[in-house]
Amino acid sequence: MTNKLRLDQAVFIGLAAMLGAGVFVVFAPAASLAGSLLPVSVLLAGFMAYLNAASIAQLAAQVSRPGGAYSYAQKYLSQNWAFLAGSSFLIGKVASSAAIALGVAGYLFPEQAIPVALLSVVVMATINILGVNRTAFGSLILGGITVLFLLFAIVSALVFGEFTAINSSPDLQGFGVLTAAALVFFAFAGYARVATLGDELKDSKQNTGKAIAISFGIVFAIYLALSYLMPAVLGNQLRFSIAPMIDFLAVTAPWFPATAVSIVAGIASLGSLLALLAGMSRTASVMGEDGELPSMFAIRSKKVQTPWVAEISVSLLVMVLILSGDLVWAIGLSSFAILTYYTIANLAAYRQPRTLSSRSQVWSILGLLLCLSLAFSVPLTSLIVGIGLLVIVFALRLGLSRIKKLS
């Protein structure tokens, strides 16, 4: 394939995927759960994300096929595990994409949220269909603007912020720190996008791990800084804030217009949406090649090799979910499904022959256990819906396979 991505382009795709709507909305509900221990929740989510990223990098060094954990489970576990990984990824990212699209509209045009959200999906899907290098260029612009803005927010707080404190304890009885970590993980989870690139990236076996490490390191440093500074500046106000970044800069940089914050939040959300749609379409395409989804999902453009049927199909699913207009449980559903996906990735890393990696199996087991712990710490409604959807898709798969055998 020509026009493969460079390492720096893959890094910006990872940044755009992680620095999306999550960073602008997740700290308020997480603070209401974790209280003054919000940085602990971020550290826990970040440590788990690091373990997951290390497992993904370990697997990507040997498997260059697009699809992420779906392809890794296929090689080192079984086709059933691969299907569960692929289904979890698609369910989680459809929920994420719908929430992010509504976030774009909520910041920019709140009175026309649903139409604008639908339009944003159409535009981002079109960019992806035109080719992966256009996706990379879009991610460079969108991710770059977001990084610069968040660095500005951090510096302004350090220089001009008057620090206070959250006068509340974490909801220990309800496992508040764990639930907050699960919500924060929603903001981290975009690094899976790099793994789905597969052989679309130059020297993918070496560069996938590097791209994940670089993009994750930058995002983790930003999130950890904000998890300390936002509660320190806003105090208890953070727990009830609808637009925490606007409130944050209203204190640290009151001259900075709130409209500009809304625009940057919209840009960040679009960057994340762009990367998520591309990642879902490639996973669906690989599953189509394997017969786990209809074969039409594997159809690619002859000119730029993008899986346009899969891109359109997942975009339509996102648009259906947008019509519900419900954001609250969507983040929890996304976290549950993606944590399930990474549980399988860690299991695949554990089952990989030791001769192929010098990394200790202990880290893969620890990542697996942490993923399961946080997956079952999401809000109850999201947990029930997530389990129900996975059971339904698995039952449909078994039913279709039996029909094929009988015919």
Image (cartoon, rainbow, N blue to C red):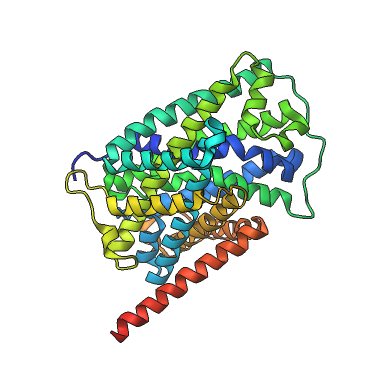
Give 195 or 51, whichever is nearer the viewer. Answer: 195
Q: In this view, does 361 lie to the left or right of 354?
A: right
Q: In this view, does 235 lie to the left or right of 106?
A: right
Q: Residue 397: x and y, percent?
A: 40, 73
Determine whether 83 is above or below 66 in the image. below
Q: Is residue 86 left or right of residue 407?
A: right
Residue pictured at 31% horizontal, 50% vertical: 198
Q: In which quarter of the image is residue 381?
A: bottom right
Q: How many labels does the image show?
A: 0
Q: Quadrant of the C terminus?
A: bottom left
Give 263 or 182, whichever is nearer the viewer. Answer: 263
Determine whether 332 is above or below 291 in the image. above
Looking at the image, which residue sits at the far top?
255
Q: Quadrant of residue 235?
A: top right
Q: Residue 308: x and y, percent?
A: 28, 50
Determine whether 98 is above or below 270 in the image. below
Q: Residue 218: x and y, percent?
A: 49, 33
Residue pictured at 55% horizontal, 42% vertical: 187
